[in-house]
Amino acid sequence: MILAWYPPVSDGGATVNGYAVTPYVGTTAQPRRVLNSTATIAVVRGLRNGVTYRFTIAARNRYGIGTASPKTSPITVSVPTSPGPPTATRIGRGHLSVSFTDAAANGATIIAYKAVCQSSNGGVTRHQNRTLGPIGVKTLTPGKIYTCTVRATNKYGSGPWSSPSNEATA
């Protein structure tokens, strides 16, 4: 889970030298993560898949940890959502480009997208993985009609498949 925040308006009379991030499940505080960095963005590790968290952040200086922020909105750590409906476009003989709207990561960075193109009239099925879209799918059967679907994967697993794309001739 990546969290980002603004630095405090006041440093309490000493330079900020870190932050403390406290995850909550419901009203129960989980172990606090003390960050020895003045960066206002951090990866919070050790969260459980499928669990909804809220977070507080507090600045730290040589006098200790300051007052925590209000809790964030609820965030569920999970597999990504389905990408938006894809569009398949012929870009060469037996080669389609599959574009789509990114999936919501749901608390963990998306590490891959997979596009699968299937034919409705006898062409071979092919797939391709990439970290970003659009995705080119090659060596499809020229002249055959295809629809493509896409799904996203993060460290918790793969999310649901998108709805099918428009029909495109390879």
Image (cartoon, rainbow, N blue to C red):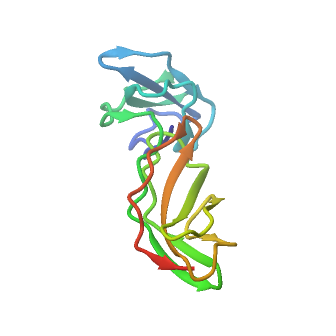
User: Which is nearer the eye, 151 or 5?
Assistant: 151
Location of the C terminus (image quadrant): bottom right
- Say above or below: 98 vs 63: below
Q: How far from the left and from the top, in percent, is residue 126?
A: 63, 62
Is 51 positioned to the left or the right of 96 in the image?
left
For residue 96, which quarter of the picture? bottom right
What is the tally of numbered marks visible in this picture? 0
The extreme bottom residue here reads: 92
| Residue 62 appears in view | no
User: Which is nearer the eye, 148 or 29?
Assistant: 148
Q: How far from the left and from the top, in percent, is residue 152?
A: 52, 50
Task: Please report the residue visible at 58 percent of the width from the left and 56 percent of the height from the top.
Answer: 114
- Say above or below: 85 vs 166: above
Is 30 positioned to the left or the right of 132 in the image?
left
Q: How far from the left and from the top, in percent, is residue 144?
A: 55, 77
For residue 73, which quarter of the picture? top left
User: Which is nearer the eye, 65 or 132?
Assistant: 132
User: Which is nearer the eye, 106 or 163?
Assistant: 163
| Residue 91 appears in view | yes
Task: Please report the residue visible at 53 percent of the width from the left and 44 percent of the height from the top.
Answer: 41
Task: Please report the residue visible at 48 percent of the width from the left and 23 percent of the height from the top.
Answer: 65
Task: Please report the residue visible at 59 percent of the width from the left and 69 percent of the height from the top.
Answer: 123
The extreme front residue here reads: 122
